[in-house]
Image: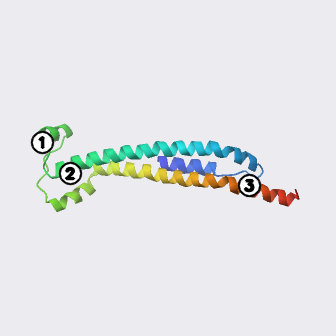
Amino acid sequence: MSKLDEVLQMWTADANIDRTEPGKALIDIPKLHSKYLHILSSHRLLAKEAEFQYNKWRKLKWEYYTGKLDEEELKQHGWQPFPYTLKSEVNTYLEADDDVNKYLVRKLLHEEIVEVCQAILKELNSRTYQLRGVIDWEKFIQGV
């Protein structure tokens, strides 16, 4: 299961509000806010780290595909010299490279988790108003 699925499952559980105890849900808002802010912050940093690794590997693979890596670097990575390619073809090879795409996928996954957490935090910010509305409605129904 991916981290994104874990965050979505946590939110599915945390999003439920017990209508019989709206006051408890109000008290839980700061805990939930802290929880998802922590997840957001850590995945923002992980997305940046993945972006740095992606850029590093993209540069290394660009040097590989353009024939600019020396023998020592080729041996270090266990690669054979790449046959000559046209400059216009290099981007095609970079976009299809598994090593480069591994870091791109990791970066995109962390960015998606960041977006999900931002949406959750936005929902939590409006939850106070929603719960107050529920409480006011219950008071109205009970004639208080």
Tags 1 and 2 in contact by the CB under 8 Å rule? Answer: no
Residue at 11 percent of width and 40 percent of height: 71
Q: CA distance from mark 2 to mark 3?
A: 57 Å
**Circle 1 or circle 3, nearest the eye:** 3
Camera-nearest residue between 91 and 77? 91
Q: Position of residue 89 (x, y in %)?
A: 18, 60
Element on which disc 3 rests: helix
Q: CA distance from mark 1 to mark 3?
A: 67 Å
Let me know if residue 121 appears in the view. yes
Let me know if residue 1 appears in the view. no
Q: Amino acid at mark 3?
A: Arg
Q: Position of residue 109 (x, y in %)?
A: 42, 51
Tags 1 and 3 in contact by the CB under 8 Å rule? Answer: no
Q: Which residue is mark 3?
A: 132
Neighbourhood count class around disc 2 (C-alpha, 10 Å): few under 14, some 14–19, many 20 upward = some
Q: Amino acid at mark 2?
A: Trp
Q: Position of residue 16 (x, y in %)?
A: 67, 52
**Circle 2 or circle 3, nearest the eye:** 3
Quarter that holds the C terminus: bottom right
Ranked by sequence position, the earlier of labels 1 and 3 is 1
Tags 2 and 3 in contact by the CB under 8 Å rule? Answer: no
Neighbourhood count class around disc 1 (C-alpha, 10 Å): few under 14, some 14–19, many 20 upward = few
Q: Amino acid at mark 1?
A: Asp
Q: Which residue is mark 2?
A: 62
**Residue farthest to the right, as pictured:** 143
Element on which disc 2 rests: helix
